[in-house]
């Protein structure tokens, strides 16, 4: 998730100054040191970090060791470990250590020198062979990468010159096999995190990417993964599989904290990364000199963690996490490596920002030896703002289109490095079987009349909107089937019955295909639809086809690929025709979504169809434009050309893109956009399939909207102990919406209404005090007028909420600046409706959505002659 604003204010990209201490300081008696500064002593650090029983010689008499003895003992252990790692001691190489050697360089041991022991002459007392490469009480201050701190990543990309910094950076990276340092990326993260300006965030990312493109292109891909806080696309299951305890253990070990010290920091900061930052800040010395992390090594370690499976994997993962934390130089690197490990990077470089940054970076930079054209920044700087926006948006459209069709940076980034932002890139990123494309999305319409107005002049199809799970089914010419969810996760194992169905539904002329439909739980005999809830009872994995309890039917609605050819550019009427003619229905197993074709003139038929949909428990209807061209017969010559309704001009009809035809399909959505940009008043709604786009050519009309009961999807973030009967539960519960601009969660309302006792009970168990899902203090990314509820919840679920109306609030600050500069928004009589199992917190409603609801409400009131709704803070709703 994005970065919270509060955190940003605290961040500081300046190097942290750490005082140097003499060896004597560390060898003083622990009590003396504790007295001296109240901090955990270095001795404690050393002891807890490395030995099971602090200060005790377990092998010997059980007597406490003197500090010096302890240091020597540790030194020997480290020496042994290092010797083993390099295979010197036993004359052979241990297989498990080979991996580690990738991480270590030959001169690792030399780097251990410069220890305080040596400075103080203590090394002289060591056996000759142990003088080098042994225990080094190493000042952490000297380890921070200061060169990267000078790179002004936050400059405008049009004035930033990567070449100015490349030589020095490369010299600095030389010791690490020339790989770009992790410090470089962290420098970028810190700058991104210190601003709320989207422009600055993008600029900073662009500049960082450009430095990598020009100085170390091989580190670009791992950098992109790290910046987007992922290691693989959703359809490749590669999970870090780390529990919180692995990070706590590593922090204790590496930073020398004990349980209480760690808990204190957690309670104070709430964010694991911030805890690491503080812990590292307190740590002045490490036992060994960190081996500087590079972007590649950090990413590879994450992949190793994810890949370590089976017996011994817990220990192996722990070792890798420890190593990452050990090697993180300084507090900021520690903060971000830990945030990465807990998969909560919070720098706002989510997918869209990254795609924009990549598109722009490759307009300005290319790797050594590449010859694709790039732009001259000085020339771009001369352009008018609008013209520059067009240059950027064209490039962004190409990159976004590629990623929507092939959502994997492993495909996109190497492509960009080779051919830049070009038609060739589009060709490389065509649809591929068994790689899910990002689904097209539907725009919300308030009600049927709004839908009919929007689609005037067009032929459209109304389809039942089934309440199930979206499924993208891929089948290749060998009959191999993959099924993907709306969020691109693999669901093949969840639906073996659908896999088995494919040979039956595939008509004779079909070799390979990608189709889309809604999987709905049904009664196998009657075909009656079951609820979404029923469908959720099916296990997610390893479903045994012989023991299936929840029967499903696939209601197909689109065909995106057929017999080696992508159909995205064909109008919906044609795709649907192919779907229905090339595939075979099987009763109560596989069929088409129920639909009617209509125009805006058929309002009564459409209304009836809508009612029939809701009667059989569908959520409403989906309405889809059938053809690219408006129906000339439906255009009213007297129509007001200033309104927003769809009509000509219309781009030339789209023909099927032939495989290999350059740039065949890049511009459909941008055409719509460009029409607008050119000042054309009419939107040219196309009937093409636009992956990852929410356009008006697909409209959803839900029954909720029809009764004009808007709902909002909020995240529960805190609770108070209930009163009376509810004393054992959380009530009220505090809810927040998302601010995608800065990554914060903005508290909107308290709710006590709509919950059953059973729900309250489950909620209390989920957010048990002191449990894994509650936090000790207010997370920094929360914006709340209430600073001290009884418990803060780890944000993790989305609740659909009803409400009486949205109010301008004297208390809450959610959506402040969007409707009013002084007041935020809240809601009266909020009522819990249901948990949105299908939504992750990144999909909760935004503050902009909340503002939109308010504006809509105001417009309605105005039409009815009413006044503005200003809050009286009745936000808790009526008691059950
Ligand atoms: P969205 O998926 O649009 O971002 P959302 O998760 O809230 O929003 P809905 O508002 O429920 O989803 O509507 C879209 C979903 O409806 C689709 O993703 C799909 O799963 C489902 N659906 C059901 N019937 C159809 C249909 N005939 N055509 C397209 N989608 C359908």
Image (cartoon, helix red, strand yellow):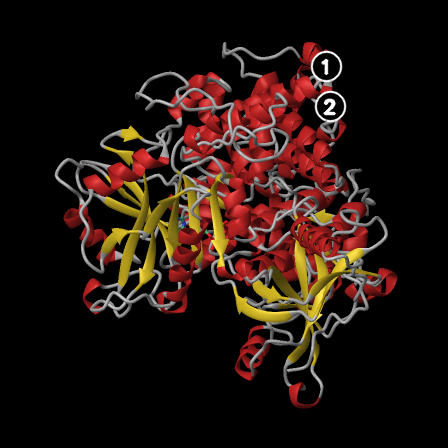
Q: Which residue is mark 2?
A: 156
Camera-nearest label, 2 or 1? 1
| Residue 96 vertical position relative to residue 209 in the rendered view, above or below | below
Q: Residue at x 42, y 23 (%)?
A: 426
**Residue 55 at x, y percent in the picture:** 66, 65
Q: Are marks 2 and 1 in contact (CB under 8 Å)?
A: yes
Question: In screen coordinates, is 380 left or right of 400?
Answer: right
Q: Which residue is mark 1?
A: 381
| Residue 281 vertical position relative to residue 159 in the rendered view, above or below | below
Q: Which residue sits furthest left?
A: 508
Q: Answer with the quarter of the image where residue 461 lies.
A: top left
Residue 159 appearing in the image: yes
Q: Classify mark 2: helix, strand or loop.
A: loop
Q: Decide: few, some or many residues near mark 1? Use Cα within 10 Å; few <14, some 14-19, many ≥20.
A: some
Chain-order first, disc 2 or disc 1: 2
Ligand 1 is within 8 Å of the C-beta of the residue at disc 2:
no
Q: Classify mark 1: helix, strand or loop.
A: helix
**Residue 194 at x, y percent in the picture:** 76, 41
**Residue 839 at x, y percent in the picture:** 51, 57
Q: Which residue sits furthest bottom?
A: 724
Question: In screen coordinates, is 291 left or right of 380?
Answer: left
Ligand 1 is within 8 Å of the C-beta of the residue at disc 1:
no
Q: Answer with the quarter of the image where residue 465 lies.
A: bottom left
Q: Answer with the quarter of the image where residue 159 lies.
A: top right
**Residue 773 at x, y percent in the picture:** 59, 68
Q: Residue at x 67, y 54 (%)?
A: 853
| Residue 89 vertical position relative to residue 844 in the rendered view, above or below | above
Q: CA distance from mark 2 to mark 1?
A: 10 Å
- 168, 554: nearer the viewer: 554
Q: Residue at x 36, y 36 (%)?
A: 572
Residue 439 appearing in the image: no
- 531, 268: nearer the viewer: 531
């Amino acid at each position: 998730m994005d970065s919270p604003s509060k955190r940003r204010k605290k961040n500081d990209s300046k190097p942290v100054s750490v005082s140097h201490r003499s060896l004597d300081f560390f060898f003083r008696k622990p009590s003396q040191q504790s007295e001296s500064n109240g901090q955990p002593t270095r001795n404690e650090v050393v002891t807890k970090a490395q030995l099971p029983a602090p200060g005790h010689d377990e092998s010997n008499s059980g007597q406490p060791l003197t500090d010096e003895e302890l240091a020597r003992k540790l030194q020997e252990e480290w020496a042994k470990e290092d010797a083993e790692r390099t295979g010197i001691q036993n004359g052979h190489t241990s297989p498990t250590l080979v991996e580690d050697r990738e991480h270590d360089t030959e001169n690792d041991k030399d780097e251990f020198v410069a220890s305080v022991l040596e400075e103080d002459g203590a090394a002289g007392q060591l056996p000759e062979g142990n003088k080098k490469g042994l225990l080094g009480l190493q000042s952490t201050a000297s380890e921070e990468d200061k060169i990267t701190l000078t790179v002004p990543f936050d400059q405008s990309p049009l004035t930033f010159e990567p070449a100015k910094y490349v030589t020095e950076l490369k010299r600095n990276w030389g010791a690490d096999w020339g790989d770009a340092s992790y410090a470089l990326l962290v420098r970028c993260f810190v700058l991104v995190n210190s601003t709320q300006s989207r422009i600055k965030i993008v600029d900073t990312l662009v500049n960082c990417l450009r430095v990598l493109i020009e100085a170390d292109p091989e580190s670009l891909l791992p950098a992109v993964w790290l910046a987007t806080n992922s290691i693989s696309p959703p359809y490749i299951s590669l999970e870090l599989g780390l529990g919180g305890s692995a990070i706590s253990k590593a922090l204790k070990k590496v930073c020398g904290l004990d349980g209480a010290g760690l808990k204190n920091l957690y309670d104070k900061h709430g964010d694991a990364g911030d805890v690491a930052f503080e812990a590292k800040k307190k740590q002045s010395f490490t036992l060994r000199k960190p081996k500087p992390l590079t972007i590649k090594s950090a990413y590879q370690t994450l992949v190793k963690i994810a890949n370590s499976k089976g017996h011994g994997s817990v220990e192996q993962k722990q070792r890798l996490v420890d190593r990452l934390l050990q090697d993180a130089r300084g507090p900021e690197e520690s903060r971000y490596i830990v945030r990465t490990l807990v998969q909560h990077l919070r720098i706002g470089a989510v997918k869209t920002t990254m795609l924009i940054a990549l598109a722009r970076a490759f307009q300005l930079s290319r790797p050594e030896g590449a010859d694709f054209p790039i732009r001259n920044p000085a020339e771009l700087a001369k352009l008018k703002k609008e013209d520059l926006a067009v240059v950027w948006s064209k490039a962004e459209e190409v990159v976004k289109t590629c990623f929507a069709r092939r959502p994997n940076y492993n495909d996109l980034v190497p492509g960009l490095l080779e051919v830049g932002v070009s038609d060739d890139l589009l060709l490389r990123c065509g649809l591929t079987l068994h790689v899910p494309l990002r689904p097209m999305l539907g725009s919300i319409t308030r009600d049927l009349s709004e839908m009919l107005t929007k689609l005037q002049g067009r032929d459209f199809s109304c389809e039942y909107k089934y309440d199930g799970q979206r499924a993208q089914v891929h089948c290749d010419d060998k009959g191999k089937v993959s099924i993907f969810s709306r969020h691109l996760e693999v669901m093949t194992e969840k639906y073996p019955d659908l896999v088995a169905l494919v040979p039956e539904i595939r008509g004779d002329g079909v070799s390979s295909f990608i189709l889309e439909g809604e999987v709905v739980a049904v009664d196998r005999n009657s075909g009656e639809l079951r609820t979404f809830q029923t469908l959720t009872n099916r296990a997610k994995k390893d479903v045994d086809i012989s023991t299936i309890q929840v029967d499903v039917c696939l209601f197909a609605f689109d065909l995106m690929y057929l017999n080696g050819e992508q159909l995205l550019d064909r109008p919906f009427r044609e795709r649907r025709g192919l779907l229905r003619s090339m595939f075979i229905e099987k009763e109560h197993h596989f069929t088409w979504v129920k639909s009617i074709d209509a125009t805006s003139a058929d309002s009564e038929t459409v209304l009836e169809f809508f009612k029939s949909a809701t009667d059989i428990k569908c959520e409403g209807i989906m309405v889809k434009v059938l053809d690219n061209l408006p129906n000339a017969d439906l255009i009213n010559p007297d129509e007001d050309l200033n309104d927003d309704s769809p009509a000509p001009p219309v781009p030339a009809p789209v023909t099927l893109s032939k495989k290999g035809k350059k740039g065949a399909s890049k511009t459909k959505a941008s055409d719509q956009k460009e029409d607008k940009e050119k000042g054309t008043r009419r939107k040219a709604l196309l009937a093409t399939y636009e992956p990852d786009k929410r356009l008006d050519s697909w409209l959803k009309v839900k029954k909720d909207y029809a009764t004009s009961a808007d709902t909002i999807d909020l995240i529960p973030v805190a609770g108070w102990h209930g009163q009376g009967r509810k004393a054992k539960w959380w009530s009220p519960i505090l809810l927040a919406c998302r601010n995608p601009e800065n990554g914060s969660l903005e508290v909107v309302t308290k709710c006590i209404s709509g919950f059953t006792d059973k729900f309250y009970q489950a909620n209390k168990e989920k957010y048990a005090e002191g449990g894994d899902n509650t936090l000790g203090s207010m997370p920094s990314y929360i914006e709340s007028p209430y600073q001290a509820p009884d418990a803060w919840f780890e944000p993790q679920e989305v609740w659909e909420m009803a409400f009486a109306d949205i109010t301008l609030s004297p208390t809450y600050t959610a959506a402040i600046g969007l409707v009013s500069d002084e007041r935020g928004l809240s809601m009266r009589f909020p009522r819990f409706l249901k948990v949105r199992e299908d939504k992750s917190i990144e999909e909760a409603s935004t503050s902009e959505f909340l503002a939109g609801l308010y504006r809509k409400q105001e417009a309605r009131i105005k039409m009815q002659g009413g006044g503005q709704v200003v809050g009286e803070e009745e936000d808790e709703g009526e008691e059950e």
